[in-house]
Amino acid sequence: MLPKRFLRGFLYLFVFLGVATTLLLIANKHQIIEINEYIPFDYFSSAAPSFFQPPSNSFIIDIAIRECYIVNYKNPNCGKPEPSAGKFGDLSSYGSSWVRVKKDLGLGKLWFHKKILSLKKLEHKEFQNLIRENIIDDTVVIDIVVGDAKADANIPGNVHRLPQKIIDKFNKDKDVENLKYDAKLQLEFKQDEGKIIENEITEKYNEEDPKKEDGKNTQNDQNKPKLKEVKGTNVDENGKRKRERKTKRNDDKSHNFDTSGVMNQLDIPTMEQVKEQGWVYKFNGVWIQYGSHNNEQAINGIDLLFGPEAVDPRPNWELIQQPIQDISISTELAPHLTFRRGPKLDYKKKYNTPLKINGDQFKILQVADLHFSTGYGKCLEPQPPSSAIGCKADSRTLKFINHVLDVEKPDMVVLTGDQVFGSTSPDSETSAFKALSPYIERKIPFAIVMGNHDAEGSLGAKEMMGLYANMPYSVAAMGPEEIDGFGNYVVSVQGKTLTSVALSFYFVDSHAYSSNPKVYPGYDWIKPNQLMYMKEEGAALRDGIAEFEKETVKEVDQETKKEKKKNRTHLSMAFFHIPIPEFKNFNQPMTGEHREGVTAPRYNTGARDVFQELGVKAIGIGHDHCNDYCLMDQKQLQLQSRQEKREGDSGDAGDAGDNKIWLCYGGGVGLGGYGGYGGYIRRLRVFALDTAKGEIKTWKRTEAEPEKIIDEQILVTGGNVVNW
């Protein structure tokens, strides 16, 4: 019996595998699923998301929304219309194709399928060739409008529920024509009125001067009175002509104008007039307007952002405030269209300029742990607790940040990780745009590093850092590919000359979670090749630093009260997200609050010593939200050999025999990140650097009292680490 049971079991298993394989092959053939998603072979590859800055070498000639089953989402053709669909039909032989915007309009909230937005594109060269051959008309997408059915229905006479913008544009164009016509009528009236008056005066003059012969008495013509408009003159037939002209002018105007020339009442266009203006209804309240392929007005990039707080800080993009209708089950995550006109811009080249020190001073605002969401963001442990009712985390955090920006007016902002809270960011781009918009709007340069939560949303670490680094006014960089992590770079601030280096800032990716959790559980650590790269970058700055420290500044000697010259001092700092183990060295000078445990990695690669050797005086981090202390970590140096001293390899250790560096938490600012720990109040840290004094000063401001400075202290003076 036993062998027969085994045989029967194998037979059932064989039949099951055969049926399953057949079903999988059929499903793959019909694009219901994608087999490579379930097997360890990458037969299909998908391009990196290009929605941030899509190429501008194509015209958009149509848009569409289609459904795609969730199990087949990674199939590049899932959710795309057929090539024959849309404007001009099948132009695939000319290079035209439907391109998916790689986002789900429903953000994964729909049960069985995703909603996909696709764009029908045609490259410029092919488009112009097709026009010359009379295969297609010269029409591309030049504008997009999303209507609000309820609001539009309340517009008097709007029986077709046309979007407000279409009505406004129609009336604006009509107003221009009416104003032109009105101006023309006024000009004609004045000309006719002038002729009437001239005739009246001429006739009267001739009656008083019977010696004048029809235009022959030139001597008397010199005595003819000068013509001027006499208001209210009405003489027989000429007066009648004047009244007729006034009547005609009023009759020709079908609407009353106010003093500014703007129509008092909106006209609702007919559907025929809407069509004449190039408007076509597409789907879910979305209308597109067609027009000539003028590069200045043609739309060549379309993206999706989500939620009522969505912003688009990209300079050449326009966000439509009205969301696409009937897509999302939550208004908090409703999709919004945003589009670009004009060429794809290199924001680094167009908007970034080299950082220069303002006299001798430079101010940095550190922004730690924003934890922004795609939607409103949930407030976690806000203070006071009563403020939790109706609290929207991101907008409340932005209000605090904007206030401090207006008070402090920093020269640069440094964001030290967890700008985006991955678990609440089904669209990381929306979250990131909100996080960076205050600095872009104010044109403040900003540097940024990755935190452990930034890459947990819809974008991976490389894509996320790429977005951060390529925004306007960002001084961040991806860093070398061969170096571990993304966002390892150095930023320098110029002195008086292009080659002098007044300040240097080191930025490092501290990664996320341990790559060897069995041996070293918890968080990851800065890798040796990252530290080696920092050393190489530091060595490249030596000549510029030496040049800057030859620059002099005048100061008054406190003893002699005489003016004297002194050399400026180069200053340096480092920033990353996760603390290094030395943040646990508590038996040392410390200012600020230590409310929670220090979640540093258990493996120490010596980052603290490397940065100290590079001349870094202070390190700024985030990660542990409710810690905001600065700790002066100091080590006793061993006696160095005379040879080391002779070679000048003593580093920048401050006082003889001491090795000091400040380790500072920024303190969490985002209401979307955890708080608690005894009533922690969100805060921001400021660093003020002064190269004339060789000084680094720091202080903080809290959300509860943003006008008040707390925990002000001097970290460095005369280029030496101190505790003042």
Image: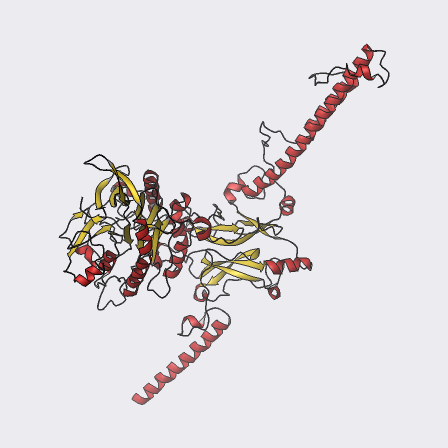
Viewer-proximal residue among 73 and 662: 662
Left or right: 397 in relation to 654: right
Q: From the viewer's perspective, is residue 661 above or below residue 91?
A: above
Left or right: 633 in relation to 26: left
Viewer-proximal residue among 689 and 384: 689
Q: Quadrant of residue 385?
A: top left
In the picture as drawn, the residue positioned furthest to the left comes out as: 587
Say how the picture is coloured: secondary structure
Residue 670 in view here:
no
Q: Quadrant of residue 561?
A: top left
**Rendered location of residue 108, percent (x, y):** 41, 58
Quadrant housing the N terminus: bottom left
Quadrant housing the C terminus: top left
Q: From the viewer's perspective, is residue 581 above or below residue 331?
A: below
Q: Residue at x 79, y 13 (%)?
A: 205
**Rendered location of residue 337, percent (x, y):** 49, 51
The number of numbered badges drawn on the structure is 0
**Rendered location of residue 697, percent (x, y):** 24, 44
Left or right: 117 in relation to 586: right
Q: From the viewer's perspective, is residue 413 above or below residue 489?
A: above
Q: Quadrant of residue 464?
A: bottom left
Residue 218 in view here:
yes
Viewer-proximal residue among 29 and 724: 724
Q: Residue at x 52, y 46 (%)?
A: 147
**Rendered location of residue 366, percent (x, y):** 30, 48
Viewer-proximal residue among 592 and 536: 536
